[in-house]
């Protein structure tokens, strides 16, 4: 989170019904590079008709902003959803704007489309931390399975403990939420489901990344210790002379 300050006065446009249209640009006070632009329509109680300055009280309507409103999405989650990045961000915008049904449908599409990609990451972790041939085979078959429900059933007992959230299989949790229909549900109910899907998917992406990172660091440490040279004092003396 950073402070943004007004960059400069922007051009002001006056409409026929005395609404003032203006773009307001703010600049990050820290990096002095990132900008935030707001598109506003302003109706002042008293307006002198000038297009050089706006002063006084009135009503302001925000059309939009660039970049769009909402907290940033974690890079690991964006990497996990891969090709469906834009669809996921559309769902995030729907969630930010209180459009529960829209957010739910977008998130469901992303998870179902990227089932193979997500399970491939699960397989990488499984091979690193478990290596059970039976579990590896289950996940490999699930990756090739076209039906989402059947694929999730295949891996319900195969996920390593490091990927489980409070002991629960995140893939099973996601499937449970995605199986809930939207036709007879309220927008508020769909919003709760959409938020839950995003949170669980985000946590899974973090655990996948951390598990692979920990394993990579462990392998690097082992390699370093195995290849470290013994000090000269530890080498045996030649000609049978005993070292003190």
Image (tube, rainbow, N blue to C red):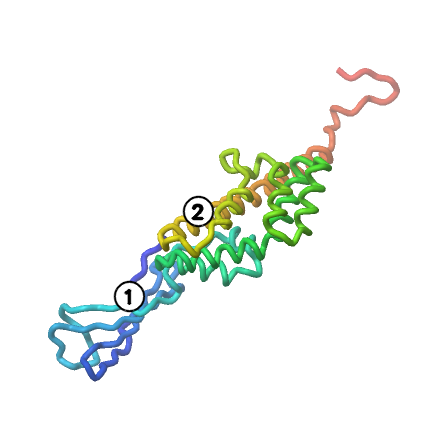
Examine the rendered structure and indicate whether residue 238 appears above or below residue 66: above
Which circle's residue, 2 or 1, is located before the other in the chain? 1
Q: CA distance from mark 2 to mark 1?
A: 36 Å
In what element is the residue under mark 2? helix
Q: Residue at x 75, y 24 (%)?
A: 234
- Residue 114 position, x and y percent, is 58, 55
Camera-nearest residue between 179 and 218 = 179
- State the residue position of label 1: 6
Residue found at the far left of this picture = 46
Place of residue 9 in the rendered image (x, y in percent of width and height, measured from the top left): 26, 73
Q: On screen, 179 above or below 89?
A: above
Q: Label 2 belongs to which residue? A: 196
Name the residue at 15% across, 71% down: 55
Depth check, front residue: 222 or 70: 70
Looking at the image, residue 17 sits to the left or right of residue 80; the answer is left
Q: Decide which of 58, 152 is in the foreground and name it.
A: 152
Side of 184 where 158 appears, left or right: right
């Amino acid at each position: 989170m950073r402070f943004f300050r007004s960059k400069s006065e922007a051009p002001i446009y006056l409409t026929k019904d005395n609404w003032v249209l203006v773009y307001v640009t703010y600049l990050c006070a820290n990096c002095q590079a990132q900008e935030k632009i707001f598109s506003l329509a302003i109706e002042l109680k008293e307006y002198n008709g000038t297009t050089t300055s706006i002063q006084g009280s009135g009503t302001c309507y925000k059309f939009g902003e660039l970049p769009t409103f909402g907290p940033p999405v974690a890079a690991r989650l964006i990497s996990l959803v891969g090709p469906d990045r834009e669809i996921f961000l559309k769902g995030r915008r729907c969630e930010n704007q209180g459009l529960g049904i829209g957010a739910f449908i977008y998130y469901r599409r992303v998870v179902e489309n990227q089932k193979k990609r997500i399970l491939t990451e699960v397989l990488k972790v499984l091979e690193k931390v478990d290596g059970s041939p039976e579990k590896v085979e289950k996940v490999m078959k699930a990756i090739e399975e076209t039906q989402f429900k059947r694929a999730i059933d295949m891996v319900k007992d195969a996920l390593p403990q490091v990927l489980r959230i409070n002991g629960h299989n995140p893939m099973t949790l996601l499937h449970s939420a995605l199986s809930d229909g939207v036709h007879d549900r309220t927008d508020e109910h769909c919003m709760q489901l959409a938020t839950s899907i995003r949170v669980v998917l985000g946590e899974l992406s973090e655990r996948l990344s951390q598990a692979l990172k920990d394993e990579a660091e462990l392998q690097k440490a082992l390699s370093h210790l195995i290849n470290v040279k013994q000090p000269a004092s530890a080498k045996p003396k030649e000609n049978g002379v005993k070292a003190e």
